[in-house]
Amino acid sequence: MNEISTEIKRKIKAYLSGNLSRQDENSLFDWVNQSPDNFSKFQSFVRENEFSLNSTNETDVAWQRFQANVSRKEKSLKRKSISKWVGIAAMVAIVVLAGYYGRNSWSPNQNAIKLKELVVANGKRSEISLTDGTKIWLNSGTTLRYPEKFVGNLRIVELDGEGFFEVSKDPQHPFIIHTPDFDVKVLGTSFNLSSYKEDQMNSLALREGSVEINSNLSKENIRLIPGDLIVLDKKNNVFSKSQADLQNIGSWMNNTLEFSNTNLLDICKSLERQFNVKIEIKSEKLKQIKFSGRFKSDEGLDQLLELLKMTSPENINYKHIQREKEELVILE
């Protein structure tokens, strides 16, 4: 077994102390997942340096995120041979052993955590209750990853998409949500979190309680109070905070689509998920037109497109094309 390079050692130390950049973090994940030999080297290095003796909440978060990433890549390989999802939401039947080693001893003989994945298809919604009593409502096109049972000092899940959370209060065991772009720490509260990978704008609106957001884009954690709305502009790497309408937080659960100064590109991505269609915008200029308003999704796609057409400062025409496997809507 070849020695680990100095650069990899630096990344492991920085990662487990919570000080590694997302770019270097991805690079470390890639290296570990290249081969079983690399994964063994990672385990050995951690044990030899006794990182577990200095375990903190931040270190636990880093380690559990690493385990979730390894598990997710294992699942992606298995998923290639699985048929298409059917029904309102696909609960992955394959349970992946994440290779989790106890934080106190890092022993390979510890029981592995069983990770599950809930995938909500476009045009569908779902809800789930976790073992700690937390309730989550999931919007179309969303993936939630969570352990079968929470262990340790932290309750950690991963979200790619949109969900409304009612987190069971347990100050001794903070609830952590990993998203593609930032992390959310919760003690017990309700809020709406939208974090689709493909969207330019991600957001969190807090109904009650308090949460903290941690991101490489901010030197300090961002704390929210009820009524706060924080938006991440991924194109410009900027967070902005404003006031949300408490009554309308999570309005999608009541078949209401709400947009505030949202460009047409992101609106169409939302419509794709809600109506399970593919939308192509032919004009780059049209993609950046911004709209604000509230729409009832049960009125149908054509009605919403007509409203956008009537309120747009630019001419918008649309047409439907029925393809073999999906419906295509073209805006031009």
Image (tube, helix red, strand yellow):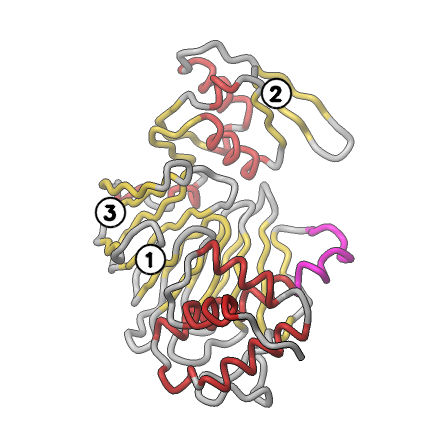
Residue 314 bears which disc, if any?
none
Which residue was labeled with disc 3?
228
Q: Does 60 appear above or below 102?
A: above
Q: Residue at x 57, y 34 (%)?
A: 272
Question: Which residues are the magenta region?
Answer: 74-86
Q: Earlier in the sequence, mark 2 or mark 1?
A: 1
Is residue 75 rendered magenta in the image? yes
Identify the element where label 3 is drawn. strand
Q: Which quadrant does the C terminus fall into?
A: top right
Q: Is 214 located above or below residue 255 in the figure? A: below
Could you tell me the amino acid type at mark 3? Asp
Q: Quadrant of residue 283?
A: top right
Determine the CA span between mark 3 and mark 2.
36 Å
Secondary structure at numbered mark 1 = strand
Query: Residue 214 got which mark?
Result: 1
**Image spot of residue 322 (x, y percent):** 72, 25
Few, some or many residues within 10 Å of mark 3 (<14, 14–19, 20+): many
For residue 330, the mark is: 2
User: Spatial distance from mark 3 to mark 1, Cα to Cα?
Assistant: 16 Å
Q: Amino acid at mark 2?
A: Ile
Query: In which image quadrant can residue 79 be found?
Result: bottom right
Residue at 68 percent across and 69 percent down: it is 35
189 displayed left or right of 43? left
Marked residue nearer the N-terminal end (3 or 1): 1
| Quadrant holding the N terminus | bottom right
Q: Position of residue 187 (x, y in %)?
A: 30, 67
Q: Residue at x 37, y 50 (%)?
A: 192
Q: Position of residue 55 (x, y in %)?
A: 37, 81
